[in-house]
Image (spheres, rainbow, N blue to C red):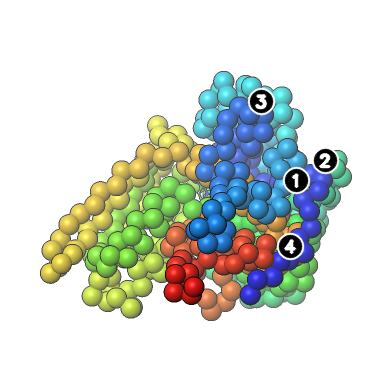
């Protein structure tokens, strides 16, 4: 099934719009600008530094991903976004404290020129923060229209040929799917009637798709994963993807989990705790925002371990996740995992993982890759949920009725095979049957 698709060339500028100009988005923007000036390497970005094997091993074909698929170049990227404070990207990056002041100073001019647009925000959905740089529209539909006007103006002012929007704003409170989300018609009625079940992130998603802009959700809250937005993506032929960037502890979990499972080692319990002191940590200190994150973090192991298929090994596993706000840590998150495992004849063993990570440093390449691959998806006319990008998410969005794949290695195979498929190359299944075929 090898069809080389007619993919439009990435001509002109690509605008990357982020609701939220905080730690993740400023680290992503500053890093991308530093990389294009040769001041640093975009480490962790598959789009920029990855290679992909093509054909048989004996062919020795391993091109750079960016030479294999037509991706926008770093030189053609333009950045913009919205926030509830009016700090420009330089000021926001200094506040976030992820990158050194010296590093930021070298690109101060470019960063200072990126000023946030006024946000669509309501403290009901993110309780622990507030700001003045916020649109004051009468209805949620008016807010959506104001965002669409921002998008159109940004595109013209910056002479962009294409845009993508990627949610890098705070995690919103837990919202259960309800009638207003069930269809586009209900949703639009709800926008006019200020329905409380429509959160700001949903309004951004709506405005993006209505403007012909793909939408990606980097946080765990409900946003583009509701039937109304799926319907809109189908109607506008736009790609969407989500949710919750896979970084830090969950990344480790989806690396370790499949390894233990592959050797059929049993697990009694997996206790994960974190301390972090950035604004994301402050937001997650609110029980409702934490609940959204907890649901996203807990779902991962179940799908990797398949307790129903392997009840003797995983059925009684106790899985607990905790996040604690601890200001002295800043963006340097520290996580501990205690994994109680058992092997041959049920003998017990323990694994302890203490990961001292920098969350935004792990998230920045994910944002860059998602923006570049979603732009590829829009040029390849791939619409709806982009499940092949599950590799980058804690809670991959799938079509209704499909279980998401969490195993990072399976996700990588799916991702690479999608690129091979797009370019008409043979899919690689690692069977190695060449010897027998000859
Ligand atoms: N850092 C990671 O590794 C990681 C991993 C997965 C998910 N995430 C998610 O990414 C998001 C960003 O993380 P961060 O560390 O940059 O947080 P942050 O608090 O530093 O930045 C979020 C920014 O969003 C702004 N904001 C909040 N609501 C807004 C709205 N409605 N419109 C516009 N701006 C709004 C805030 O003012 C803040 O500046 C969070 O939701 C976080 O949970 C981060």
Q: Is residue 324 left or right of residue 338?
A: right
Q: Is residue 43 above or below residue 252?
A: above
Relative to the observer, which residue lies in front, 172 or 350?
350
Q: Is residue 353 above or below residue 309?
A: above
The residue depicted at 54 percent of the width and 53 percent of the height is 60
Asked whether residue 68 is in view, the answer is yes
Relative to the observer, which residue lies in front, 95 or 257?
257
Q: Which residue is mark 2?
A: 158
State if disc 4 and disc 1 touch (CB < 8 Å): no
Q: Residues within 10 Å of mark 2 (few under 14, many from 20)?
A: some
Q: Which residue is mark 3?
A: 107
Query: Whole-Å distance between the Cαs marked 2 and 1?
Result: 8 Å
Disc 3 within 8 angstroms of ligand 1 (CB): no
Q: Nearer the viewer, mark 4 or mark 3?
A: 4
Secondary structure at numbered mark 1: strand
Asked whether residue 387 is in view, the answer is no
Sequence order check: which comes first, mark 2 or mark 3? 3
Query: Whole-Å distance between the Cαs marked 2 and 3?
Result: 19 Å
Q: Which residue is mark 4?
A: 380
């Amino acid at each position: 099934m090898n069809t080389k698709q007619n993919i439009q060339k990435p001509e002109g500028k690509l605008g990357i719009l982020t609701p939220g100009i905080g730690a993740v988005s400023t680290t992503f923007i500053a890093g991308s600008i530093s990389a294009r000036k040769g001041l640093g390497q975009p480490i962790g970005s598959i789009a920029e530094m990855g290679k992909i094997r093509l054909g048989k091993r004996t062919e020795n074909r391993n091109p750079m991903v960016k030479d294999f698929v037509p991706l926008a170049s770093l030189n053609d990227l333009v950045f913009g976004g919205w926030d509830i404070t009016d700090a420009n990207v330089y000021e926001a990056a200094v506040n976030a404290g992820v990158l050194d002041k010296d590093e930021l100073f070298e690109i101060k001019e470019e960063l200072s020129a990126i000023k946030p647009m006024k946000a669509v925000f309501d403290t009901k959905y993110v309780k622990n923060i507030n700001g003045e740089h916020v649109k004051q529209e009468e209805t949620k539909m008016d807010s959506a229209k104001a965002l669409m006007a921002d998008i159109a103006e940004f595109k013209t002012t910056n002479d962009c040929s294409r845009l993508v929007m990627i949610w890098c704003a705070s995690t919103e409170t837990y919202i259960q799917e309800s009638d207003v989300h069930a269809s586009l018609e209900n949703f639009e009625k709800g926008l006019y009637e200020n329905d409380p079940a429509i959160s700001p992130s949903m309004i951004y998603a709506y405005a993006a798709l209505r403007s012909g802009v793909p939408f990606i959700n980097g946080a765990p809250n409900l946003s583009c994963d509701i039937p109304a937005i799926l319907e809109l993506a189908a109607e506008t032929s736009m790609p969407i993807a989500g949710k919750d960037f896979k970084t830090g502890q969950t990344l480790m979990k989806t690396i370790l989990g499949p390894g233990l499972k592959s050797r059929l080692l049993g697990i009694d319990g997996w206790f994960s705790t974190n301390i972090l002191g950035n604004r994301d940590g402050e937001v997650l200190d609110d029980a409702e925002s934490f609940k959204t994150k907890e649901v996203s973090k807990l779902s991962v192991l179940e799908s990797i371990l398949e307790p129903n298929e392997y009840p003797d090994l995983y059925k009684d596993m106790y899985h607990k996740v905790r996040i604690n706000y601890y200001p002295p840590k800043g963006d340097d998150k520290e996580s501990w995992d205690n994994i109680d495992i058992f092997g041959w004849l049920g003998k017990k063993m323990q694994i302890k993982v203490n990961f001292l990570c920098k969350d935004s440093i792990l998230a920045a390449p994910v944002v860059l890759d998602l923006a570049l691959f979603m732009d590829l998806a829009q040029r390849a006319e791939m619409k709806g949920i982009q499940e092949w990008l599950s590799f980058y998410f804690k809670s991959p969005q799938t079509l209704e009725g499909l279980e998401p794949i969490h195993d990072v290695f399976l996700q990588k195979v799916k991702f690479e095979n999608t690129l091979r498929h797009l370019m008409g190359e043979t899919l690689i299944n690692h069977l190695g049957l060449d010897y027998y075929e000859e």
